[in-house]
């Protein structure tokens, strides 16, 4: 199980063991860390996170990129911004550093 390093929106840090094959949003929802209001349809932005070491996170999906573009000006979009519902957890994500966005 990959180990994820989380910084919450209030600055607390925690380590999370995430099952592979589920979305990152599902892993974070199980801990009460993101809302994920649209259920993973890339249409709400309430699963927004920042990856500090984004090189191990993989590429954005097309839908994810459009949604993040649409959120610009409303939330703090950064270079490491991602929608956690669009990323399936794999062993390659071991050590991923994630900051939860304030609106998630
Ligand atoms: S859960 Fe709505 S955009 Fe990810």
Image (tube, rainbow, N blue to C red):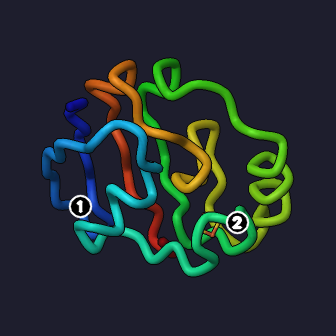
Instruction: Residue at 18%, 47% (x, y): give it.
Output: 16
| Crowding near the residue tagged with mark 1, few <14, some 14–19, many ≥20 C-alpha atoms within 10 Å | few
| Crowding near the residue tagged with mark 2, few <14, some 14–19, many ≥20 C-alpha atoms within 10 Å | few
Label 2 element class:
loop
Q: Are discs 2 and 1 less than 8 Å apart at CB?
A: no
- Ligand 1 has an atom within 8 Å of the beta carbon of the residue at disc 2: yes
Measured from the top left, where is residue 62 in percent x and y?
A: 83, 42
The furthest residue to the front: 21
Q: Nearer the viewer, residue 11 or 59?
A: 59
Instruction: Residue at 52%, 64% (x, y): give it.
Output: 47
The answer to whether 2 appears left or right of 26 in the picture is left
Q: Report the disc number at residue 41.
A: 2
Instruction: Residue at 26%, 48% (x, y): give it.
Output: 6
Is 43 located above or below residue 83 in the figure?
below
Is 61 located above or below residue 76 in the figure?
above
Measured from the top left, where is residue 92 in percent x and y?
A: 38, 19
Sequence order check: which comes first, mark 2 or mark 1?
1
The answer to whether 97 appears left or right of 35 in the picture is left
Measured from the top left, where is residue 75 in percent x and y?
A: 65, 68
Is 35 located above or below residue 60 in the figure?
below
Give how far apart the Cα atoms at labels 2 and 1 are: 27 Å
Measured from the top left, where is residue 34 in percent x and y?
A: 40, 70
Instruction: Residue at 52%, 73% (x, y): give it.
Output: 36
- The image quadrant where one finds the N terminus is top left
Q: Report the disc number at residue 11.
A: 1
Disc 2 or disc 1, which is closer to the eye? 2
Ligand 1 quarter of the rendering: bottom right
Label 1 element class:
loop
In which quarter of the view is residue 90 placed?
A: top left
Q: Report the disc number at residue 103.
A: none
């Amino acid at each position: 199980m990959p180990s994820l390093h989380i910084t919450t929106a209030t600055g607390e840090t925690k380590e999370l063991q995430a099952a592979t094959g589920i979305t990152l949003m599902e892993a974070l929802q199980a801990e009460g860390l993101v809302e994920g209001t649209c259920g993973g349809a890339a249409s709400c932005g309430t699963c927004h996170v920042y990856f500090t070491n984004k090189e191990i996170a993989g590429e954005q999906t097309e839908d994810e990129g459009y949604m993040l573009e649409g959120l610009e000006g409303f939330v703090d979009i950064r270079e490491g911004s991602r929608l956690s519902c669009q990323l399936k957890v794999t062993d390659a994500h071991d050590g991923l550093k994630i900051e939860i966005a304030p609106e998630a």
